[in-house]
Amino acid sequence: MTGKFLSLKDDEYKGFISRLKQANEKLNAFNFIDEKEKNGKIISVKDNICVKGMPATASSKILQGYTPGFNATAIERLEKAGFSVIGKTNMDEFGFGSFGLNSENPAKNPFNEEYVAGGSSSGSAIATALIKEHVSIAESTGGSISAPASFCGVAGLTPTYGVISRYGLIDYASSLDKIGFMGKSADNIREVMESTIGSDPNDTTSLSTAISNKKPNKLYVIDNLMAGINEGIKDRFEDLLVKLSAKGYKIEHVKMDYLEYSVPAYYILSMSEASTNLAKYQGFKYGFKVKDFSLNYNEFFMSARKQFGKEAKRRVILGTFIRSKSIKQKYYEKALAIRHAIIGRMDKILKDGFIIMPTMPIFTPKISEVKDISPVEAYSMDMLTVPPNLCGFPHLSFPYFYEKGMPLGAQVITDHFNDYSLLDFLSEWENDFQYKFKEEVS
Amino acid sequence: MEKDEFNRLLKTARIDLDEEESAYIEKDINDILRFFDKLEDVSLNDEELAFHSVEIPEKLRDDSNENKNEIENVFYNGENYRFYFLGPKI
């Protein structure tokens, strides 16, 4: 099936850019909009994925001024398939956040500007909601596609780890980072995904395994994961299960061990990896430059790293601590064992069914409600998006309800390399579901 | 984590905080470590360690000499003067 994308004629382009910039002033969807005319099918790209000649900042001050001289493999493949990048989308700094607020220009929800857009791929979700027939290339480490997709009412697909090359992705946590997609149509997401998959000599963790589409008719609900979810969300989710049951899906309730440890395990692994990945920002190669060459190496390095935002500093400090030789076993190795235990348990039930759950445990919050919450409270909001991300299972967040005008999302998870079954599920869902958007830029 | 240990950690992580930042980040770090300590409740001695979520076949590249325009790449985006790349003193 071929998707339908926005393509603009030369005389339409200027007007489109002007309307997009106007919308961007209100919502902060883009860090950069390219005014050069484009010939291909329009897509946008998260600001931590390199596009030749466009700034790549990952919304960090330390990368201000960095312009890559090469394309990420995913972008190279998309350009060959006839896609054109319109701009780079806003995000939480380096992907560190679930609400889109860890950026110099906090992202705002396209349905109501007082509400969060979700993170970390906040701008990708807003751009997808805003632009006609749009797909945005996003990235997820612990839920950065599903969370904003849910809050902004679009579909978000996080593929199996390794299916899309990470070459050219500004890394956060290498064993968890996955490039993925947001869209408003299964056909569009499928076309973009088909253009990007496959092994890449520049990324030794990329895989060429064939992607299947075995769509089961059983949906598993993990009861112990549902504890701690807002009661209103639970009620709407029950209504969704009734609808899916009427469509012929068999619903089965199960319990699964170790899931309550998935969030701390995820943060231990991701912070450890982030603290080493961010060591490359030293003030003389990428982005921000320290000009005082009289400083010794440590002073120079520390001076550059003052540019990190507070969440980045927290994660570098904690990651450094967790990797210390004396406590590696207590945190890091335990987290790896938990990841292994959860993969085994999820894998077993994903052999004959999808797992289904709400995407987020709360309704879309107002910016004022979450901008000052503690880090532990913020991390706990990832309780539903972390398990599939920690274990590399492909998953899809799809909108299913509008509560007081704001969208609600649920997510389905499937077995490794069965990604296309999720798009078949979305295709089927779209037959009866009407996406709602306040405005579309075209 | 005590104040002294926190200060030593900042040095190792090469993060310089002003007084105000230091106060709230130290508190955050201790709160987050208490959250991580939840893992002490679980015993997984016989469980394998999953460094990756899917099996990644070992891929090794042959050693070969290729012209990769490395000098151009090194200078790209960096401060440089003629044939030199400017960096801090070691």
Image (cartoon, rainbow, N blue to C red):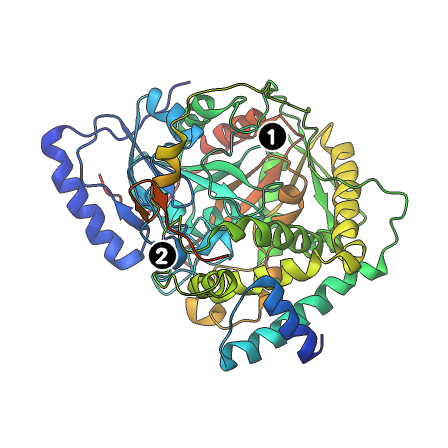
Q: In the image, what residue occupies the spot 53% across and 26% down?
A: A424
The answer to whether B6 appears left or right of A287 in the picture is right
Residue A234, percent from left and from top: 62, 55
| Disc marking residue A205 | 1
Residue farthest to the right? B46
- Residue at x 31%, y 51% (from the top left corner): A65
Query: Rounded to the nearest whole Å, what is the CA distance between mark 2 and mark 1?
Result: 31 Å
Closer to us: A129 or A218 = A129
B23 vs A294, nearest the viewer: A294
Seen in the picture, residue B66 relative to B18 is either above or below; the reply is above
Which picture quadrant has residue A184? top left
What amino acid is found at the position of numbered circle 2 in the picture? Answer: Lys
Tag 1: residue type? Thr
**Within 10 angstroms of label 1, few (less than 14), some, or many (20 or more) residues?**
many
Q: Is residue A255 visible?
A: no
| Mark 2 on the same chain as mark 1 | yes
Helix, strand or loop at label 1? It is loop
